[in-house]
Image (tube, rainbow, N blue to C red):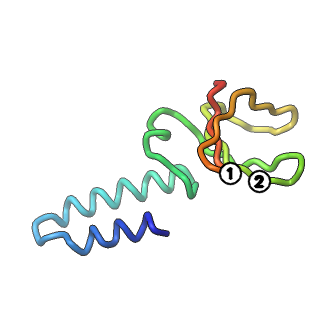
Amino acid sequence: MAVYLGYFFVGTSISDGDWITLICVFGMIFLFVFCSQAQYFNPIFLLLGYKFYGVTKENGVKIFVISKRRIQETEGLQFLDLRRINDFTFIDKGC
């Protein structure tokens, strides 16, 4: 929520001539959030071809994986080189 409030406060400080810039920036942010369908996102990941997946582990723990692989089925799926971003978000470096 804090991320989106930051954009709101920036938007309230825009002068009259900068509305086009504001609309372009908010449009790009909306596009990135819409394409990632994720809470945790970095626009660079989208540009580099990463995809975002919500994965439930065997023990029921849900994690968020960012990977270049296209995952269509989970049977036999293994991640051999995951790097931790935070407690529940990982990036797959073994592409």
How would you rate the neighbour count of disc 1 (Cα within 10 Å): few for under 14, some for 14-19, many for 20 or more? few
Please identify the quarter of the rendering in which residue 95 is found.
Answer: top right
**Total labels drawn:** 2
- Residue that protrudes farthest toward the left in the picture: 17
Q: Position of residue 22 (x, y in %)?
A: 24, 63
| Left or right, 38 with reference to 53 | left
| Left or right, 22 with reference to 81 | left
Please identify the quarter of the rendering in which residue 38 is found.
Answer: bottom right
- Residue under the point 43% across and 63% down: 3
How far apart marks 1 and 2 lie (CA) works out to 7 Å
Instruction: Name above or below for residue 65 compared with residue 95.
Output: below
Q: Position of residue 79 (x, y in %)?
A: 75, 31
- Residue under the point 62% across and 28% down: 93
- Residue that protrudes farthest toward the top in the picture: 95
Q: Position of residue 55 (x, y in %)?
A: 75, 47
How would you rate the neighbour count of disc 2 (Cα within 10 Å): few for under 14, some for 14-19, many for 20 or more? few
**First in sequence: mark 1 or mark 2?**
2
Instruction: Name above or below for residue 24 compared with residue 85.
Output: below
Which amino acid, mark 1?
Answer: Phe
Instruction: Name above or below for residue 84 compared with residue 14.
Output: above
Instruction: Name above or below for residue 14 compared with residue 31.
Output: below
Please identify the quarter of the rendering in which residue 65 is found.
Answer: top right
| Residue behind mark 1 | 88
| Residue behind mark 2 | 62
- Residue under the point 87% across and 32% down: 76
Is the residue under label 2 in contact with that under label 1 (CB below 8 Å)?
yes
Q: Give the number of the mark in front: 1 or 2.
A: 1
| Left or right, 59 with reference to 25 | right
Where disc 2 sits, the SS reads strand
